[in-house]
Image (cartoon, rainbow, N blue to C red):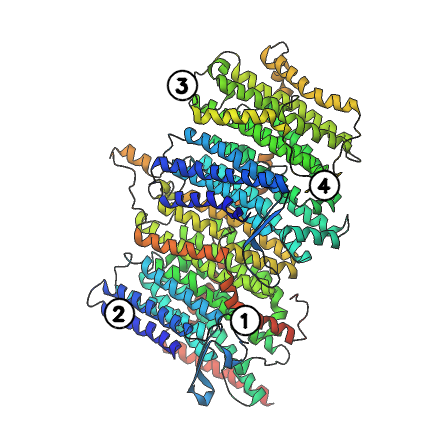
C-alpha cells in the first residue's frame, strides 16, 4: 500500500498547494516541500522495512511474486485491466532521483515564480506523481495513464510560466509526446489482443504479456510503437527537436524536471517494456537504434556548440548525452546496460544543476543570450565555480558520475561494434568543445557592460550581481556530492540495478534466435 | 607502507579546503596549506624512497574497488615501483620548490587562494597518474592534470586570449585522450583487465611480437601520449599554454604533466615491445618533433615560447629514447629535464617578474650584472639543456644519442637527426642567454627576487649541475639489455660530445661577438620567408585551423537552426495547406453545396453501377 500512499501524497499535496495559495503566496512552496519530503520518507520507510539483504540480492524480477514491493488490485477486470504497481531496484533509484530533483525544482524556483504560485506547485507535484507512477506501473494501461498524467502538468508549466515563445514550445512538446503516446496505445492494445489470442485471457498485465511470440513482422510493428513513444521522450535523434524549444521556454523548475526525470521515463520505458516484451524484434532493430544513438551523440554535441542561448546549449547537450543511453541499452550487455543506468542518474543531476544555473543567470541578467554575458566570475565566483564543476561533469571528467556512465557504455559497446564506439567517442571531444565554450562565454573573459558603464559616466561599479547564497549553494553542494559519489563509488547503485540488467541478459540466453551478442 | 594513500591525499585535501574557502582564508594560512601540503607530500615520498632503497620492495595498496560490473572491476589502488618513485620524487620535489617560488611570484595576485588550490589539485592528480595500479585510475589522473592545466593556463581569465589558449590546450589533448580511451577499451575487451601488471602479463602470453592487436593498442595509447606530451601532430597547444603564470609553465608544461606521455609508454613498455612498428613510429615522431621544435625555437622572440618549444624538443628526445627501447635513458632525461627546465622557467619567471611582465627578449639585455643570480641560473640551465659536458643534461642526452645510434636498421639516421637537434639546442639556448643577459640594457629591473624565489633557483641549479649522478632504481622495471650501447665506436662518442660545444661556439659568434653576421642572409627574401615559416611553428596551426576548426564551426553554423525541424515544419505546412483547401469548400453558398452534392451522387452512381456489372 505504501506505493499508493506515495502517489496519493503527491496528488493530494498538489491539490493542497493549489488551495494554500488563498492563504498566502509562501504557503504553497512549503506545502510542496513538505509533500515531497513526506513522499520520500514513505518510500524510504517502506524500503527499510524489507528484510535485510533483499536490496542487495533482488530475486528474479521476471517473476511477479518477488519484487521488492508488489501490489495488485482489480480495476476493470472485464477487460483484464488491473491496478498493478511494483518496485524494484531500478524503479527505486529512479523514484529517489525524481523526488530529490523535485525538491531541487521547488528550491530553484523559490523566488522565481510570483504568478499563481499555488497552481505552479500543484503542477510540479502532479508531474512528480505522474513520473513516479510511470516508474511503478506494471499494468500497461495504467502505465499509459501515468504517461499522460505527467504530460499535462508539464504542458501547463511551460504554457503558463514559460518565457517569450512559450505557446509554440508548449504546443510542440504536447504534439510530439501525444502523437507518439498514441502510437504506444495502439501497440498496447495490439499486444493485449495478441495475448488474448495466445492464452484466451484478456490482460494488460506486464507479466501476462512477457514472452509472447509473434507471427511474421507483427512483433516488429508493435515494438516500433513502443520504441517511437520512448525515443521521442528520450529524446533520440531525429525525434528530439521538441526538446530545445521546450527547455528554453520552460521555467527553471520545468527545465529541471524535464531534463532530470521526464527524459529518463523514455529510457526506463525502453528498458522495462520495449526490450523485454519484444526481445527478438529489438534484437533485429538494435543496429538501427545504435545508429540513432551514435548520431544523437554527435549531432547533439555539434548543435550544442552552435547555440548562443545558454538553455538551448544545455538542451542539445542532453540530446548528446541521451544518445549514450540509447547506445548502452541496445549494446545489450552488462557493462553497457549498467552504464546507461548510471548515465540516467548522472545526467539527471548534472543537467538539472546546469538548468538551475541558467535560471539563476536569467533571473539576474534577464537574458539567456551568452553573447551578452562574459566575465561573470568576477562578480559571482561561487556561481562560476558551480558552473565549472557541472560543465566538466558533463564533459565526462573521470571521478564524476558521467564519466563512469559513458565509459561503461563505450566499454560494453566496444565488444559489440568497435567502429561505432569510435564514432561515439568523438562525442567526448565535442563535449569538451561545447562545455568549455559555454564557460568561456559566460564566466570568463572581460566583464561585459563595464566599459559601457564607464563611458556613460555613471561611475557605478560594473554590474554588481548577487552571487549564490546559502539556499542555492546547499542544493548545488548536494548535487556535487552525489556526482562525486557516482563517480568514485557507484557500487551500491550498480548493485540495485543489477537484477534488471541480469534479467535482460537472461532474455538473450533464453532466446536461441538471438545471436551475435557478446555477454 | 600503508601510508601510501597520504601522499596524494595531502595536496588533494589542501586543494579542497582552499576551494571551499572561496578566497576568504587568511593569506598566511593559504601559504602554509598551499606550499606546506606539497612539502609534506615530498617528505613522505622521501621516506618512501629511503625505504625502497633499502629493500627494493614494490608497494601495493588497494583503497577500495571503484566499481564491479561483470568482470570489470578496477580499483582505487596504487602500485609503486622504481619508475613510479622517480616520477613521484620529481613531482613532489620539483613541485614543492615551484610552490615555494610561487609564494613570492604570485604575491600581488588577488586570486592567490585559487592559484594554490589549482596547483595543489594538479599535484594530487599527477600523483594519482603515476601511482595508479590500473589504467582507468591512471586515466583519472591523466584527465585531472588536463583539467588543472586548463584551469591554470586560463588562470587570468579576464583576457579572452588566455581562455582561448586554455581551451586549445584541453581540446587538443582531449583528442589524444580519446584515442587513449579507445585503447583502454580495446585492451579490456581483448585481455579482460585494466590492471597494469596482469594486463602486461596477459599481453605477453596472448600476443606474439608483431601481431596486429598490440600494434593497434599501442598506436591508440601513443595517441594519448603525443597529446599530453605535445609531440607531433598534437603539439600545437603547448606554446599557447604559456599564457598561464610562469611557475605553472615550470611545473605543468615543463617538469611534470607534459612528460606523462613518456611515463605512459615506459609504464606499458611490455606492450610496445610487442609492437616493434609502433616503437619505430615513436622514435621517428620523437626525431621529427625535436627537429621541428628546435628550428622553431631558433627564431622566437618571446622568452617563454622559446622555452616551450625547447620543452617540445626535449620531450622529442625522450620519445626517441623510448623508440630505441632505451627506456631508462628516456626516464633519466625526463628527470634531468625536469630539473633544468624548471630552473630555466623559474629564472625566466624571475626576469619577467623583475621587468614589469616583459616577455620579448629583444627588449631585455644586459641583465648579467643586474640580476646575477638569475643570470647564473640561466647559464647553468642552458648548459644542461644544451648538454654541455658534465652537466646533468649531458649524461642523459648522451645516453639517448648513443642508444639511437645502436638501434638496428635506421639507427645512424636517427643519430644524425638527433645530433643536428643537439646542435640547434645549443644555438637557441645560448642565443637566449646572450641576448637577454649581455649587451646593452633595454629595460631596467625594478626589483630583485627575494629568498622564496632565490632558494628554488639555487637548489634547482645544483640539481641541474649534479643530477647526472643520481642513480635511478629502474633496473627491476625495464628489461635488461634494452637500448644498450656498449659497442659504439669512439668516433661516434666524440662527435656526440663535441656537437653541443660547436653549437655554443656558433651561438657566441652569431649573437655575442657578432663576428659572424647572417644579417644579409636573414634579410634576403628566402631568408625572411624561412624565418616567418619557422616563427609560425611551420604553419601547423594554420593548417589545423583550415582543416579542422573551420569545417567544424562551419558545420555547426550550418546546422544551428535545427535541420530536422524542416521535416516537422513540412508536416505542419501540409496540414495547413489541407486545412485551407478543405475549408475553402465551405463557402456557405447553397448553389455550391447543391451542385457538389449532385456531382458526388453522380460519381457514387457510376461506382455502384460499375461494381454491380
- Asked whether, in this view, residue A465 is left or right of residue A326, the answer is left
Q: Which residue is mark 2?
A: A18
Within-10-Å neighbours for mark 3: few <14, some 14–19, many 20+: few
Whole-angstrom CA distance, mark 2 to mark 4, is 71 Å
Q: Which residue is mark 1?
A: A499
Within-10-Å neighbours for mark 4: few <14, some 14–19, many 20+: many
- Asked whether, in this view, residue A358 is left or right of residue B226, the answer is left
Question: Disc 1, disc 3: CB below 8 Å?
Answer: no
Q: Secondary structure at mark 2?
A: helix
Whole-angstrom CA distance, mark 4 to mark 3, is 50 Å
Q: Which residue is mark 4?
A: B279
Residue A133, image x, y percentages: 41, 74
**Which residue lies at the image location 67% right of the left edge and 53% below the top edge?**
B199
Q: Secondary structure at mark 4?
A: helix
Question: Disc 4, disc 3: CB below 8 Å?
Answer: no
Q: Is residue B533 visible?
A: no
Label ID, residue B42: none
Q: Which residue is mark 3?
A: B446
Please give the chain letter of the residue carrying mark 4: B
Between marks 2 and 1 in the image, the one whose residue lies nearer the viewer: 1
Amino acid at each position: 500500500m505504501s506505493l499508493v500512499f506515495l502517489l496519493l501524497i503527491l496528488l493530494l499535496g498538489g491539490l493542497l498547494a493549489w488551495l494554500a495559495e488563498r492563504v498566502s503566496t509562501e504557503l504553497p512552496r512549503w506545502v510542496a516541500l513538505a509533500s515531497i519530503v513526506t513522499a520520500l520518507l514513505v518510500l524510504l520507510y517502506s524500503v527499510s522495512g524489507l528484510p535485510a539483504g533483499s536490496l542487495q540480492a533482488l530475486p528474479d524480477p521476471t517473476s511477479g511474486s518477488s519484487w521488492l514491493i508488489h501490489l495488485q488490485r482489480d480495476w476493470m477486470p472485464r477487460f483484464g485491466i488491473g491496478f498493478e504497481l511494483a518496485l524494484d531496484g531500478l524503479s527505486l533509484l529512479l523514484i529517489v532521483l525524481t523526488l530529490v530533483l523535485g525538491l531541487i525544482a521547488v528550491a530553484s524556483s523559490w523566488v522565481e515564480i510570483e504568478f499563481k504560485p499555488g497552481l505552479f506547485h500543484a503542477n510540479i507535484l502532479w508531474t512528480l506523481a505522474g513520473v513516479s507512477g510511470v516508474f511503478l506501473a506494471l499494468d500497461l494501461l495504467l502505465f499509459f495513464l501515468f504517461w499522460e498524467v505527467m504530460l499535462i502538468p508539464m504542458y501547463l508549466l511551460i504554457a503558463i510560466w514559460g518565457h517569450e515563445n512559450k505557446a509554440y514550445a508548449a504546443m510542440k512538446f504536447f504534439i510530439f509526446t501525444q502523437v507518439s503516446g498514441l502510437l504506444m496505445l495502439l501497440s498496447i492494445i495490439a499486444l493485449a489482443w495478441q495475448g488474448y489470442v495466445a492464452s484466451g485471457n484478456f490482460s494488460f498485465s506486464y507479466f501476462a504479456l512477457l514472452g509472447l511470440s509473434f507471427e511474421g513482422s507483427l512483433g516488429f510493428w508493435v515494438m516500433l510503437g513502443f520504441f517511437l513513444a520512448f525515443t521521442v521522450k528520450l529524446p533520440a535523434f531525429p525525434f528530439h527537436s521538441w526538446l530545445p524549444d521546450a527547455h528554453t521556454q520552460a521555467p527553471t523548475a520545468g527545465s529541471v524536471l524535464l531534463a532530470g526525470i521526464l527524459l529518463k521515463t523514455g529510457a526506463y520505458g525502453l528498458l522495462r517494456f520495449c526490450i523485454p516484451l519484444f526481445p527478438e524484434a529489438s534484437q533485429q532493430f538494435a543496429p538501427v537504434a545504435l545508429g540513432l544513438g551514435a548520431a544523437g551523440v554527435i549531432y547533439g554535441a555539434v548543435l550544442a556548440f552552435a547555440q548562443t542561448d545558454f538553455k538551448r546549449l544545455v538542451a542539445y547537450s542532453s540530446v548528446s548525452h541521451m544518445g549514450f543511453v540509447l547506445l548502452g541499452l541496445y549494446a545489450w550487455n552488462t557493462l553497457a546496460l549498467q552504464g546507461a543506468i548510471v548515465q540516467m542518474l548522472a545526467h539527471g543531476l548534472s543537467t538539472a544543476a546546469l538548468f538551475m544555473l541558467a535560471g539563476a543567470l536569467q533571473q539576474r541578467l534577464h537574458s539567456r543570450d551568452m553573447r551578452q554575458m562574459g566575465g561573470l566570475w568576477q562578480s559571482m565566483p561561487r556561481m562560476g565555480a558551480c558552473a565549472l564543476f557541472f560543465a566538466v561533469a558533463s564533459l565526462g571528467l573521470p571521478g564524476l558520475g558521467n564519466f563512469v556512465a559513458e565509459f561503461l557504455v563505450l566499454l560494453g559497446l566496444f565488444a559489440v561494434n568497435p567502429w561505432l564506439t569510435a564514432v561515439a567517442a568523438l562525442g567526448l571531444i565535442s563535449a569538451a568543445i561545447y562545455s568549455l565554450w559555454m564557460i568561456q562565454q559566460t564566466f570568463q573573459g572581460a566583464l561585459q557592460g563595464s566599459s559601457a558603464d564607464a563611458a556613460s559616466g555613471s561611475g557605478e561599479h560594473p554590474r554588481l550581481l548577487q552571487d549564490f547564497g546559502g539556499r542555492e549553494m546547499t542544493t548545488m553542494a548536494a548535487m556535487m556530492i552525489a556526482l562525486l559519489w557516482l563517480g568514485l563509488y557507484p557500487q551500491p547503485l550498480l548493485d540495485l540495478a543489477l537484477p534488471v540488467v541480469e534479467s535482460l541478459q537472461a532474455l538473450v540466453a533464453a532466446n536461441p534466435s538471438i545471436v551475435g551478442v557478446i555477454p | 607502507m600503508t601510508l601510501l594513500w597520504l601522499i596524494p591525499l595531502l595536496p588533494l585535501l589542501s586543494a579542497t579546503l582552499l576551494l571551499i574557502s572561496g578566497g576568504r582564508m587568511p593569506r598566511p594560512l593559504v601559504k602554509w596549506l598551499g606550499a606546506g601540503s606539497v612539502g609534506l607530500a615530498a617528505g613522505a615520498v622521501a621516506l618512501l624512497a629511503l625505504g625502497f632503497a633499502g629493500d627494493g620492495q614494490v608497494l601495493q595498496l588497494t583503497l577500495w574497488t571503484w566499481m564491479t560490473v561483470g568482470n570489470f572491476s578496477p580499483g582505487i589502488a596504487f602500485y609503486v615501483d622504481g619508475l613510479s618513485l622517480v616520477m613521484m620524487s620529481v613531482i613532489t620535489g620539483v613541485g614543492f620548490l615551484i610552490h615555494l617560488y610561487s609564494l613570492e611570484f604570485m604575491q600581488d595576485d588577488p586570486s592567490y587562494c585559487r592559484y594554490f588550490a589549482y596547483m595543489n589539485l594538479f599535484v594530487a592528480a599527477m600523483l594519482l597518474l603515476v601511482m595508479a595500479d590500473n589504467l582507468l585510475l591512471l586515466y583519472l589522473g591523466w584527465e585531472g592534470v588536463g583539467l588543472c592545466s586548463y584551469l591554470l593556463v586560463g588562470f587570468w581569465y579576464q583576457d579572452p586570449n588566455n581562455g582561448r589558449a586554455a581551451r586549445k590546450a584541453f581540446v587538443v589533448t582531449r583528442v589524444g585522450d580519446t584515442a587513449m580511451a579507445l585503447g583502454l577499451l580495446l585492451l579490456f575487451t581483448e585481455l579482460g583487465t585494466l590492471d597494469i601488471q596482469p594486463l602486461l602479463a596477459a599481453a605477453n602470453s596472448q600476443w606474439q611480437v608483431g601481431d596486429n592487436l598490440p600494434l593497434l593498442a599501442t598506436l591508440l595509447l601513443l595517441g594519448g601520449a603525443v597529446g599530453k606530451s605535445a609531440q607531433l601532430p598534437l603539439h600545437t597547444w603547448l606554446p599557447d599554454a604559456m599564457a598561464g603564470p610562469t611557475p605553472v609553465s615550470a611545473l605543468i608544461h615543463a617538469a611534470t604533466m607534459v612528460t606523462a606521455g613518456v611515463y605512459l609508454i615506459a609504464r606499458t613498455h611490455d606492450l610496445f615491445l610487442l609492437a616493434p612498428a609502433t616503437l619505430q613510429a615513436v622514435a621517428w615522431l620523437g626525431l621529427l618533433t625535436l627537429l621541428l621544435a628546435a628550428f622553431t625555437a631558433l627564431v622566437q622572440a618571446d622568452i617563454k615560447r622559446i622555452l616551450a618549444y625547447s620543452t617540445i624538443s626535449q620531450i622529442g628526445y625522450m620519445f626517441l629514447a623510448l623508440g630505441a627501447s632505451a627506456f631508462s635513458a628516456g626516464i633519466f632525461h625526463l628527470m634531468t629535464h625536469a630539473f633544468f627546465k624548471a630552473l630555466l622557467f623559474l629564472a625566466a619567471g624571475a626576469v619577467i617578474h623583475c621587468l614589469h611582465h616583459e616577455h620579448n627578449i629583444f627588449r631585455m639585455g644586459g641583465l648579467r650584472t643586474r640580476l646575477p643570480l638569475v643570470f647564473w641560473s640561466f647559464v647553468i640551465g642552458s648548459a644542461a639543456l644544451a648538454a654541455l659536458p658534465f652537466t646533468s643534461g649531458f649524461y642523459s642526452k648522451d645516453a639517448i644519442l648513443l642508444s639511437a645510434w645502436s638501434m638496428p636498421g635506421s639507427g645512424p639516421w636517427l643519430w644524425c637527426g638527433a645530433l643536428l637537434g643537439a646542435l640547434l639546442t645549443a644555438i637557441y639556448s645560448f642565443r637566449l642567454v646572450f641576448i637577454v643577459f649581455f649587451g646593452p640594457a633595454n629595460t631596467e629591473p625594478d626589483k630583485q627576487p627575494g629568498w622564496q624565489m632565490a632558494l628554488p633557483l639555487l637548489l634547482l641549479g645544483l640539481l641541474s649541475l649534479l643530477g647526472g649522478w643520481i642513480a635511478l632504481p629502474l633496473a627491476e622495471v625495464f628489461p635488461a639489455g634494452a637500448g644498450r650501447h656498449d659497442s659504439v665506436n669512439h668516433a661516434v662518442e666524440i662527435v656526440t660530445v663535441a656537437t653541443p660545444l660547436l653549437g655554443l661556439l656558433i651561438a657566441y659568434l652569431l649573437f655575442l661577438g657578432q663576428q659572424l653576421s647572417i644579417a644579409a642572409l636573414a634579410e634576403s627574401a628566402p631568408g625572411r620567408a624561412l624565418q616567418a615559416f619557422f616563427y609560425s611553428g611551420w604553419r601547423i596551426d594554420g593548417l589545423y585551423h583550415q582543416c579542422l576548426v573551420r569545417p567544424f564551426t562551419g558545420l555547426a553554423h550550418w546546422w544551428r537552426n535545427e535541420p530536422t525541424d524542416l521535416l516537422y515544419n513540412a508536416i505542419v505546412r501540409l496540414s495547413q495547406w489541407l486545412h485551407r483547401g478543405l475549408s475553402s469548400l465551405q463557402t456557405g453558398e447553397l448553389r455550391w453545396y447543391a451542385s457538389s452534392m449532385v456531382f458526388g451522387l453522380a460519381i457514387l452512381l457510376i461506382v455502384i453501377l460499375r461494381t454491380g456489372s
